Amino acid sequence: MTEIFTGSFTQQEPIPEEAVEAALAVLRHGRLHRYNVVPGELGETALLEQEFAAQTGAKYCLAVSSGGYAMATALRAVGVNPGDPVLTNTFTLAPVPGSIASVSARPVFVGVTEDLTIDLGDLETKLDQARVLMLSHMRGHLCDMDRLMQMCDAAGVTVIEDCAHTMGAAWHGQVSGRQGAIGCYSCQTYKHVNSGEGGLLITDDEELAAKATMLSGSYMLYERHLAAPGPEVFERIKYHTPNVSGRMDNLRAAILRPQLRDLDRQIERWNERYFEIEKGLRETPGLSVVDRPEAETFVGSSIQFLLLDWSAERVNEVIQRCAARGVELKWFGGAEPNGFTSRYDSWRYADSAPMPKSDRILAGIVDMRVPLTFSLDDCALIARIIRAEVSAVYQS
């Protein structure tokens, strides 16, 4: 009898009761705006920033409206101007080049390796083309961060980290987002903590932190932040930093604080599911599992595999056959954007030239969410279905 998976790839776990109660408390008192506090009240957003800074070991943290807004704010804070080139990954999601375009800068695309990380060899040839790298840890894959930072530091290139998929990850024990000048995180529903939308930005640089805070719309209320530099830093930059409002509110912050306290346990659960699927996919004819480096601590909230050098028709056949059995796979090799998947040459607002080595890899990347609503038995079933359908098409 043919096995069918009947679960949902988009259903998240319920918001924890502690977070629901915290949200209800904010709704009951009505002070949703982060600066709307009564005397002696610290506010949920300020507390969230203080707690996330401590959790990551950063000096400063800012909570904002989305991960994309965090990236655009980071670009503005480091001084990217209209027309400036900004290096970024070929393999990423649209909000990353979108953040560069939002400040009227120009993405310069860097290739991808079969490990699904930025191609450091290609990066080395392009470091003289820009002074900023927007590094996307796409789908939670960390490159050799030691080598990357050595290269960028030597070239005078400032690194901003897109950590939308690496909240809780690390390289050689160093928290993702702490190697570059600024780390940017997403709190959107399909990320590692869920407030629907939301973002966090961390840095150790006091002037970057002050600029980001002013950019986010603090007006002259920056002293109400608990994870920000002192007022003397704001005095240096406040007259020259525009307000591009994108604050987080107290309701979302209240929902996030309990989830962040539980992040380590959730990562363990994600990785249990990831390894169950990976185990079932290994040694499948025609399919390559992406091996994770020993130095990387990752969060398995999604999984990718490669069907390298398959024709588009055969990849599509795998995706359709799996879909017929209830397994939703996404493909990054399609000529047209589809849902959240797109390619560097899909973004017509950004100039690009063909990148044959990267095109070959993109054409083989198959991606799948791993929500915590899946049981381990679900994961084993999903792996059996993928294995069966990939094998059937491979052998046909």
Image (cartoon, rainbow, N blue to C red):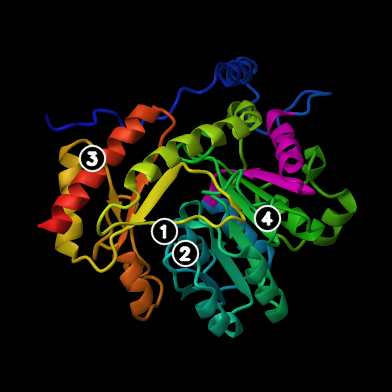
Location of residue 53 (image quadrant): top right
Label number found at residue 6? none
Which of pointers 3 and 1 lies earlier in the amino acid sequence? 1
Q: CA distance from mark 4 to mark 2?
A: 28 Å
Q: CA distance from mark 4 to mark 3?
A: 35 Å
Marks 4 and 1: which is nearer the front? Answer: 4
Which of pointers 4 and 1 lies earlier in the amino acid sequence? 1
Q: CA distance from mark 2 to mark 1?
A: 6 Å
Q: Amino acid at mark 4?
A: His
Q: Which residue is mark 2?
A: 97
Residue 43 appears at what percent x and percent y? 73, 28
Label number found at residue 94? 1
Asked whether residue 330 is in view, the answer is yes
Location of residue 260 (image quadrant): top right
Q: Secondary structure at mark 3?
A: helix
Asked whether residue 219 is in view, the answer is no
Q: CA distance from mark 4 to mark 1?
A: 29 Å
Residue 256 appears at what percent x and percent y? 60, 31
Q: Which residue is mark 4?
A: 172
